[in-house]
Amino acid sequence: MTPQQPDRRNFIKKASLGSFLSLSLTEIVLSSFTEEKVSKIMLKKDDIILFQGDSITDSGRLKTETGANQSRLLGNGYPFMASSDLLMQHPTKNLKIYNKGISGNKVYQLAERWDTDCLELKPNVLSIMIGVNDFWHTLTSNYTGTSDTYRKDYKALLERTKQSLPDVKLIIGEPFAVTGVKAVTEKWYPAFNEYRQAAKEMAASYNAAWIPYQTVFDNAQKLAPGSYWTTDGVHPTLAGARLMATAWLETVKG
Amino acid sequence: MTPQQPDRRNFIKKASLGSFLSLSLTEIVLSSFTEEKVSKIMLKKDDIILFQGDSITDSGRLKTETGANQSRLLGNGYPFMASSDLLMQHPTKNLKIYNKGISGNKVYQLAERWDTDCLELKPNVLSIMIGVNDFWHTLTSNYTGTSDTYRKDYKALLERTKQSLPDVKLIIGEPFAVTGVKAVTEKWYPAFNEYRQAAKEMAASYNAAWIPYQTVFDNAQKLAPGSYWTTDGVHPTLAGARLMATAWLETVKG
C-alpha cells in the first residue's frame, strides 16, 4: 500500500472491508475512478491508437517489425489486452493500434524518439504512461532528474504533441508503485508521490482522460497481496496487467 | 460463413439484421450460446486449469520453460486472454493455469503426449479444442484419418482422462472454420461439419461445457468479414482470439 495517499484513505472511509469483499474485481477497478474526474474519450472510425511508455507498456513487444493490430508487436501486457477488447468490440471502426513503449524509458527518452515513435504515426488517440523510472532510476542508476524535471519535460512533450496533433485525444496513466514488493521500499516515499501528482496535473492541464492506476492497485490489494498483482512492485503480473487493461478500457466510449 | 449449418440458419431466423447490428460483440458472443445447452463449470479454490489443443491454443507459447500463470508460457491467444481475466477476477482462488497446446496436433497426437501434458498435471479443469487439423490435413498432408477416426480417438482420450481424473471438469471447444478466407474453401464441406458434430457429441457424452465457436464466428461475421476475425479461415486474428476468450469465459462461473 502507498503511504500518504489521501485518495485511498478516503476510499477506505467510504467502503467498509465487508462491503469491499463482495465486489467483483471489475467493480473494484470502476470504484477507483469514483473520486477522480472521469473523463472519457470517444472512439471514431479510422482512429489510430498509440500506446506509449516504458517497460510496463513495452511488455516484451517485438521491435524488429512494424504494423498495426499484430499480437507480437503489442507485447503481452495491458496494451495487448486492451487492444484485443477494442478490436473485438469495434469491428466496423477500422482501428489501427500500435504499441511503442520501450523498457527503461523516462520522459526525456520519450521526447528523444517522439517524432518517429509518435508524431509520424499521426495517432488520433494517444495513451501515455511514464514516470516510474524518472523516480526509480534516482535510486538505482544515479539519475539526477527530479520531479520538477519530470513535470517540465512532460509538459514540453505534451505541448509539442498538441502543436503537431491539435485534435489528438489524450489518455494519461498514473505512474504507480506497490510498496513492500521487492523493489518498492519506504525509500520511495514521499518523493515518488510527487511524480504521481505531476502526471495528474498533466492530465488536468491537457484535458486528458486520467487512469488512476495507483488507486486501482491499492484497491486490488484489499483482495490479494501486492505480490499477486506485481512481480517487483513496478511491473504487473498477468492478473495486474488485466487489471490495468480493465481500467484503461474504462476511459474509452463509443 | 459455413454452409449447411442449421444452428446459424435458426439464429438468423430469430435475429433480424437490424436488431443484430445494435448488439455489442459481447452480446453476440452470448447469443451464440442460446441454442445450445449452456453448461457451466464452477471454479474452486486451488483449481489447476489446463488448456489443450492445436495451434489455435498453442498461439506461440514459449515451450522451453514450464510454470503456471506466466504470460509467455500461455501464448498470445484465447488461453492467455481468458487466463488474465480469470486471474484478475479470482485473486483469492490460488488458480494455477497451464497451456499445453501444440501447433499442428490432431487428436491422436494429443493422446501420444497425454500422460505428460495432461494427466501428470492433474488438472481440475481441462479445456480441449481439437479437430481442425484432423480434417484439414486430409486435404493438405495426405492424412488418411476420417471423422470416425477422430470420434473414436477423441472418445478414447476422454475415457482415459476420466479414469485417471474422475472429477475433472471438462470444457470442449468446437472446431470451427471461416469459409471463404484463404485456406477454407467449399472443399471443406460437408465433411468438416462431421468433425464439429463429433466434438459436440463428446461434450454431451462426457458432460462437458460446450463452446459453440462456429456459431460465435458465424455471428461475428454479421458485423465484419471473416478476414477480420481469422487470418486464414482457421487461425484467429487478435479480434478473433478475444472473441474466443469471451466465449470461453462464458462457460465458467464462481
Image (cartoon, coloured by chain):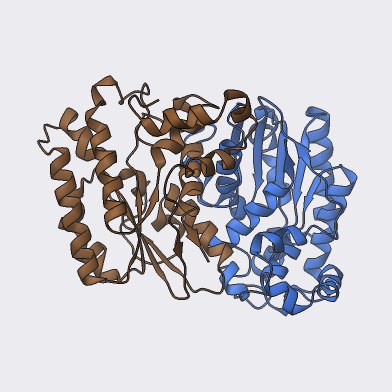
Chain colours: A blue, B brown
Task: Write the residue at 76% across / 48% down.
Answer: A172
Percent from the top left, x then y, of residue B113? 19, 59
Task: Write the residue at 9% across / 36% down.
Answer: B144
Percent from the top left, x then y, of residue A193? 81, 67
Closer to the camera in the image, B22 or A137:
B22
Closer to the camera in the image, B104 or A178:
B104
Task: Write the residue at 27% across / 33% down.
Answer: B193
Percent from the top left, x then y, of residue A118? 68, 35
Closer to the camera in the image, A241 or A35:
A35
Q: Is residue B78 visible?
A: yes
- In the displayed structure image, the side of residue B192 where residue A115 appears, left or right: right
Which quadrant, please, contains the N terminus of chain B?
top left
Residue furthest out toward the right? A205
- In the displayed structure image, the side of residue B57 where residue A230 appears, left or right: right
Closer to the camera in the image, B25 or A38:
B25
| A232, above or below B85, in the image | below
Task: Write the residue at 26% across / 25% down.
Answer: B189
| A156, above or below B75, in the image | above
- Count of labels in the image: 0
Percent from the top left, x then y, of residue B88? 57, 63
- In the displayed structure image, the side of residue B110 where residue A46 appears, left or right: right
Q: Is residue A83 visible?
A: no
- In the displayed structure image, the side of residue B223 where residue A151 appears, left or right: right
